[in-house]
């Protein structure tokens, strides 16, 4: 009789075969043909026997035909569009953070991972970043977020992200050089530096050109929504910069705050701890 042990073929990022999906009751409704499920348990947990780790965590999603840039590269913590480009049948999948479920480890004992669809190493890293980001996301002051919304900048940024997101790994905000200053009145504007991180894995020259287009669109957006003549209101865009993802330093990674299309707020007063502690204020 087969037993689950450390020699299991299952790894994080593997997709369940159709027969396993059927046995688990996941092939129901009109979307049954497009349903997928990805193993998200860590390899170390997968290698443990069922009496130690009795379940495997999977996330259920569906195949889609068109990418939405707002959901690529883990920019949105609730939803991810991820390419599975390796294997004989490359696909694009749509997964939601609320669609996680635990299945008995023994339910996969008689199954091998889907042999037609695989994640590349880079795609697995994106999946891991997305899973972590739900518990590690950056946040900005309520007043700053209110101004983004009330000026129309937020909706404009979402539209830009949707258009160019396929080429952008992340959009970083440096607000008031990391200091959580209280602001009062639209004449007391936040200082903002935006950094666009573009993807160098897939046609970097095109990605850089698209990032430049996004930069220009962001500059026009802030000028239209937050500037009257030469006077800035609510938020002053000090600069918008384009950077290759491979050029991001460890120090930058520690101090930058990533803006996501569904970010959460921190109270401006009293000051709340940032994701990286004091790193953002150095």
Image (spheres, helix red, strand yellow):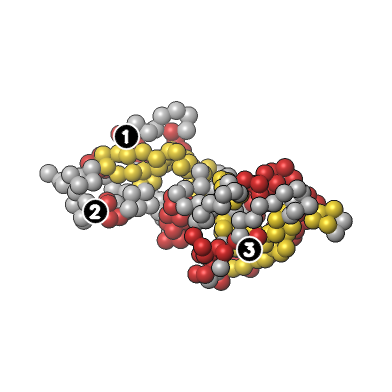
Element on which disc 1 rests: loop
User: Who is closer to the viewer here, 64 or 58?
Assistant: 58
The residue under the point 51% across, 63% down is: 278
The residue under the point 43% across, 52% down is: 132
Q: Residue furthest top?
A: 29
**Mark in front: 3 vs 2:** 3
What numbered label is drawn on residue 177? 3
The residue singled out by tag 2 in the image is: 47
What numbered label is drawn on residue 24? 1
User: Who is closer to the viewer here, 157 or 103?
Assistant: 157
Near mark 3 (Cα within 10 A), the count class, few <14, some 14-19 or many ≥20, is some
Quadrant of res 20: top left
Q: Earlier in the sequence, mark 2 or mark 1?
A: 1
User: Who is closer to the viewer here, 17 or 234?
Assistant: 234
Distance from the alpha carbon under mark 3 to that under mark 2 = 45 Å
Q: Residue furthest front?
A: 270
Near mark 2 (Cα within 10 A), the count class, few <14, some 14-19 or many ≥20, is some
Near mark 1 (Cα within 10 A), the count class, few <14, some 14-19 or many ≥20, is few
Q: Earlier in the sequence, mark 3 or mark 2?
A: 2
Relative image position of residue 154 (x, y in whole percent): 68, 47
In the displayed structure image, the side of residue 21 where residue 199 appears, left or right: right
Q: Residue furthest right?
A: 229
Relative image position of residue 107 (x, y in whole percent): 25, 39
Relative to 263, residue 7 above or below = below
């Amino acid at each position: 009789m087969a037993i689950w042990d450390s020699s299991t073929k299952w790894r994080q990022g593997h997709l369940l075969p159709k027969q396993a999906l059927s046995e688990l009751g996941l092939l129901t409704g009109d979307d049954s043909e497009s349903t997928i499920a990805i193993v998200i348990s860590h390899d170390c947990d997968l290698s443990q026997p069922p009496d130690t780790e009795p379940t495997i965590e999977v996330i259920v999603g569906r195949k889609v035909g068109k990418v939405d840039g707002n959901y690529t590269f883990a920019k949105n913590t609730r939803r991810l569009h991820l390419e599975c480009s390796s294997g004989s049948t490359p696909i694009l999948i749509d997964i939601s953070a609320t669609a996680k479920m635990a299945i008995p480890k023994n339910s996969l004992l008689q199954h091998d991972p889907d042999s037609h669809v695989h994640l590349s190493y880079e795609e697995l890293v994106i999946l891991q970043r997305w899973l972590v980001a739900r518990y590690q996301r950056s946040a900005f002051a309520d007043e700053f977020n209110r101004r983004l919304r009330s000026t129309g900048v937020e909706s404009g940024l979402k539209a830009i992200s949707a258009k160019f997101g396929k080429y952008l790994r992340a959009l970083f905000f440096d607000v008031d050089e990391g200091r959580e200053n209280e602001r009062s009145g639209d004449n007391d504007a936040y200082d903002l530096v935006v950094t666009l991180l573009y993807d160098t894995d897939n046609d970097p020259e095109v990605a850089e050109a698209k990032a430049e287009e996004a930069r220009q669109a962001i500059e026009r957006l802030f000028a239209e929504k937050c500037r009257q003549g030469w006077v800035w209101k609510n938020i002053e865009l000090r600069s918008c910069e384009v950077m290759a993802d491979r050029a991001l330093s460890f120090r930058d990674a520690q101090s930058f705050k990533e803006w996501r299309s569904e970010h959460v707020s921190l109270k401006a007063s009293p000051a709340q701890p940032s994701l990286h502690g004091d790193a953002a204020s150095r």
